[in-house]
Amino acid sequence: MHAVAEKIRWQEFREMELDDADAYLYELIDGEIMKRNYPSLEHQETLSRLFIQFRLFADQQNLGRVLPAPFGVILDEFNDVQPDLIFVSETKRDIVRRDGIHGVPDLLVEIISPTSVTRDRVRKKAVYERLGVAEYWLVDPQNGSIEVYERTETGYELFSDSETSPVVKSKVLAGLEVEAKALFAGNP
């Protein structure tokens, strides 16, 4: 009979001492520590362009804060994640603290890499959906695609995607439009 591993809480996770020479980043997903590789140049180029678009849009309309990774998001007792891009509206501004976000942001973006497909498309999406993230973007530089999911009463539904339109839209940041072709232009 297998012993069931005890779930780790975010406080324990944050207190762990990791080797400075370790070449991985870590997140806590449903009480389990998950390691991931450092992002690629393609990932960072995509993140930079998205961050600029989101930040300028949110700042011009005084909508809230846009933060890029790495910045921890403590969604609940067993989830301390590092999405690639975070938006927290002005109405939730009190969840933004010096050591991370303590609560559920309005919008999260994950940029998929070949090693993160299952984690981003399945595990993290399920956590974000269950815990009430209103909008979730999956950005895939490898395939040049963007999917925007909105949370409804029955769960996430695809709201906007680059397969059906060259421009994807946000519901949370109403008026924000991202052209997929331009976002991925110039990626290595």
Image (cartoon, rainbow, N blue to C red):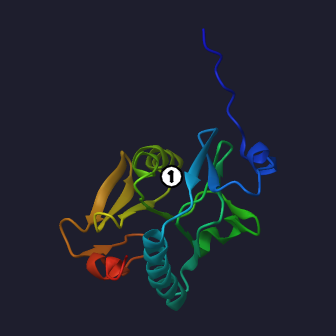
Q: Is residue 137 left or right of residue 90?
A: left
Identify residue for label 1.
Answer: 132
Residue at the top extreme? 1
Quadrant containing the N terminus is top right
Q: Quadrant of residue 95?
A: bottom right
Residue 154 to residue 68: above or below:
above
Q: How many marks?
A: 1
Quarter of the image for residue 180 reads bottom left
Q: Position of residue 138 (x, y in %)?
A: 39, 61
27 or 170: nearer the viewer? 27
Question: Tag 1: Cα neighbours inside 10 Å, few (<14), some, or many (≥20)?
Answer: some
Could you say where residue 21 lies in the image, as x and y percent from the top left? Answer: 73, 57
Image quarter (top left, top right, bottom left or bottom right) of the C terminus: bottom left
Name the amino acid, label 1. Answer: Gly
Above-or-below relation of 142 to 36: below
Instruction: Find residue 72 and report its image quarter.
Output: bottom right
Residue at position x 76%, y 50% from top?
18
